[in-house]
Amino acid sequence: MTKEEFIKYVYDNNRIRLTDDQFSGKEEIKYSLYLNGLTSLPEGFNPWVIGSLHLIDLVEIPENFTPFVSDHLDLQSLRKINIGFRPKVESLFLDNLSEVPLWFNPEVKVLILGGLGDLPENWNPFNVSSDIKINWDININFKMTLDFINFQI
């Protein structure tokens, strides 16, 4: 998808005309964006969203995608985290990841890894300021609960 096609998609689905500065994150977007249906993003899209960013069908993100989102970033279908992905968000939903890379350190209050069975043994997400929630089933390992749930900086 080109930048122009993406901007048209945003307008058609949200009635918001993105400027070049909003596209690149130099200027804030003062509304939540609902971009469900997109499976990829154009290079250079790094938004600053006052609200939420819904990308529930996105399966791949560009390298160095670093959005700032004041509410939640919903990436339910994302299967892999690319190098350089470092979002700054209130809540980050990553329900379909099969693994979390050791280098991954998002700036979030709540990180939701709904489909993940285990966390990497040496993973130290020091920028998560409140909760990490894994495995929507209630069978979370007690040691993980002590070590990772309610992790405080």
Image (cartoon, rainbow, N blue to C red):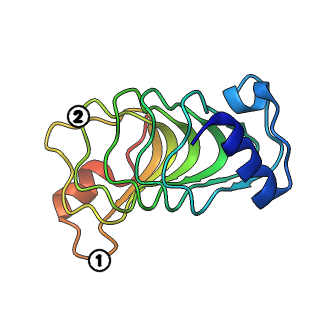
Bin the neighbour count of mark 2 within 10 Å (Cα to Cα): few under 14, some 14-19, many 20 and up. Answer: few
Q: Position of residue 44 (x, y in %)?
A: 58, 27
**Residue depicted at 34% across the width and 73% down the height:** 136
Mark identifier at residue 137: 1
Above or below for 4 versus 10? above
Examine the rendering and report whether any part of residue 51 can be seen.
Answer: no
**Residue depicted at 19% across the width and 64% down the height:** 142
Front residue (pair 146, 11): 11
How many angstroms separate mark 1 from mark 2 (CA)?
23 Å
Q: Position of residue 29 (x, y in %)?
A: 79, 39
Bin the neighbour count of mark 1 within 10 Å (Cα to Cα): few under 14, some 14-19, many 20 and up. Answer: few
Q: Residue furthest left?
A: 121
Quarter of the image with the C terminus in it? top left
Q: Are marks 1 and 2 in contact (CB under 8 Å)?
A: no
Q: Position of residue 113 (x, y in %)?
A: 36, 58
- Residue 37 as seen in the image, left or right of residue 120: right
Mark identifier at residue 102: 2
Image quarter for residue 46? top right
Front residue (pair 40, 93): 40
Q: Position of residue 82 (x, y in %)?
A: 35, 35
Front residue (pair 131, 47): 47
> How many numbered marks does the figure carry?
2
- Label 1's element? loop
Say what amino acid the circle numbered 1 marks: Asp
**Residue depicted at 22% across the width and 50% down the height:** 99
Quarter of the image with the N terminus in it? top right
